[in-house]
Amino acid sequence: MIKIIAYICLVGSFLAFGSGTLGLFKFPDPYTRMHALGMSDTLGVGLVGLGLILLSPDWILRIKLIIVLFLFWLINPTMTHMVAKAGLIHGVKPVKDTKLKKG
């Protein structure tokens, strides 16, 4: 039963990564593309990590996977925000009808 849940998590991660790739090609500007990739990468890596945690035979490996997931979930949204902010500072314009929050 645990292997079935792990495999469902791994398939779900591939679907999340696929939706991010679709967003990369479909959305009009770098900011919406970055949002799609950041969200789908966070979900995809989380599901891969959960699947690997369920399949890992050793508790030390599980702890290492949990630490890696925690670091990824901390770093990925932060870096996505920093890259978007740097784009705004350096003059990369979003599409015409995008409302930007000043501040």
Image: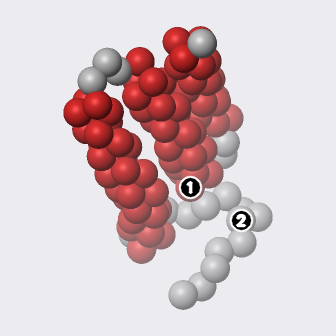
Image location of residue 47, percent across then percent down: 52, 31
Image location of residue 55, percent across then percent down: 41, 18
**Quarter placement of the N terminus:** top right
Residue 79, by quadrant, is bottom left
Which disc, if any, is residue 98?
A: 2
Looking at the image, residue 32 sits to the left or right of residue 67; the answer is right
Which residue lies at the image location 66% right of the left edge and 42% below the top edge?
27
Q: Is residue 78 visible from the viewing direction of this image?
A: yes
Looking at the image, residue 23 sits to the left or right of residue 92; the answer is right
The reply to whether the C-beta atoms of the residues labelled 2 and 1 are less than 8 Å apart is yes
In the image, residue 92 sits, relative to residue 2, either above or below, namely: below
Which disc, if any, is residue 83?
A: none
In the image, residue 82 sits, relative to residue 31, either above or below, namely: below
In the image, residue 88 sits, relative to residue 27, either above or below, namely: below
Image location of residue 52, percent across then percent down: 40, 24
Residue 99, by quadrant, is bottom right
| Residue sitting farthest toward the bottom | 103
Q: Amino acid at mark 2?
A: Thr
Which residue lies at the image location 59% right of the left edge and 19% below the top edge?
5
Instruction: Give the mark nearest the N terminus, 2 or 1.
Output: 1
How far apart in space, not on screen, are marks 2 and 1 (Cα)?
10 Å
Q: Amino acid at mark 1?
A: Tyr
Colouring mode (rainbow / by chain / secondary structure / one colour):
secondary structure
Image location of residue 96, percent across then percent down: 72, 62
Per the image, label 1 sits on a secondary structure element best described as helix
Per the image, label 2 sits on a secondary structure element best described as loop
Judging by the rendered image, the residue that carries numbered circle 1 is 31
Which residue lies at the image location 45% right of the left edge and 57% below the top edge?
77
**Quarter placement of the C terminus:** bottom right
